[in-house]
């Protein structure tokens, strides 16, 4: 009674043991590479940390969240997130823009803890701080 070779036996018969040995060697390397690479969650945390580093007063506020750059409950970028991407993820390079077109610059919005990518969220008058000499 002869026995049919399984898939592994068929592949070994056709290609020899080299592909399997290569796979056994490469698989752990691929797993190490994946473990070291920056996944989406780590990238978001890194960007949130960078935002807090650039604007320490947003720590613990609603702006220390995905919604600073993304539409609520979405992976899509909001207007501020798109400007941030266009300006090579440089917070300072987006400060003079009014990304959401609500009449307030991104810097004024961030200083007042309102979302610079949401036109329905504007600084309340009590939270607008003007530089000395401009108020
Ligand atoms: Ca806004």
Image: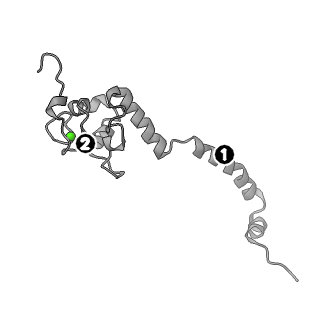
Near-viewer residue (91 or 55) = 55
Q: Residue at (86%, 81%) from the top-left corner?
A: 2
Residue 88, disc: none
Q: Residue at (33%, 40%) from the top-left corner?
A: 85
Task: Give the residue number, with chain letter if any, for mark 2.
Answer: 117
Q: Position of residue 88 (x, y in %)?
A: 34, 35
Q: Residue at (51%, 41%) from the top-left corner?
A: 38
- Identify the colour scheme used: one colour
The answer to whether 116 is drawn above or below residue 10 in the figure is above
- Helix, strand or loop at label 1? It is helix
Q: Residue at (13%, 37%) from the top-left corner?
A: 103
- Helix, strand or loop at label 2? It is loop
Q: Is 39 on the left-hand or right-hand side of 97?
A: right
Residue 29, disc: 1
Near-viewer residue (87 or 111) = 111
The response on whether ligand 1 sits within 8 Å of label 2 is yes
- Rendering quadrant holding ligand 1: top left
Q: Quadrant location of the C terminus?
A: top left
Q: Position of residue 8 (x, y in %)?
A: 75, 67
Q: CA distance from mark 2 to mark 1?
A: 41 Å
Which residue, as the protein is rendered here, is positioned at the far right?
A: 1
Residue neighbourhood size for the residue with mark 1, other residues' Cα within 10 Å, grouped as few (<14), some (14–19), many (≥20)? few
């Amino acid at each position: 009674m002869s026995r049919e070779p399984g898939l592994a036996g068929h592949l070994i018969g056709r290609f020899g043991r080299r592909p399997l040995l290569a796979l056994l060697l490469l698989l752990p390397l691929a797993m190490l590479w994946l473990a070291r690479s920056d996944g989406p969650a780590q990238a978001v945390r890194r960007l949130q940390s960078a935002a807090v580093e650039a604007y320490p007063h947003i720590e613990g506020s609603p702006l220390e969240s995905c919604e600073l750059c993304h539409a609520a409950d979405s992976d899509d970028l909001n207007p501020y997130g798109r400007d941030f991407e266009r300006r090579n993820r440089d917070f300072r390079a987006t400060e003079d823009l009014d990304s959401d077109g609500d009449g307030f610059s991104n810097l004024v919005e961030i200083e007042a803890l309102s979302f610079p990518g949401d036109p329905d969220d504007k600084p309340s008058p009590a939270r607008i701080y003007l530089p000395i000499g401009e108020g």
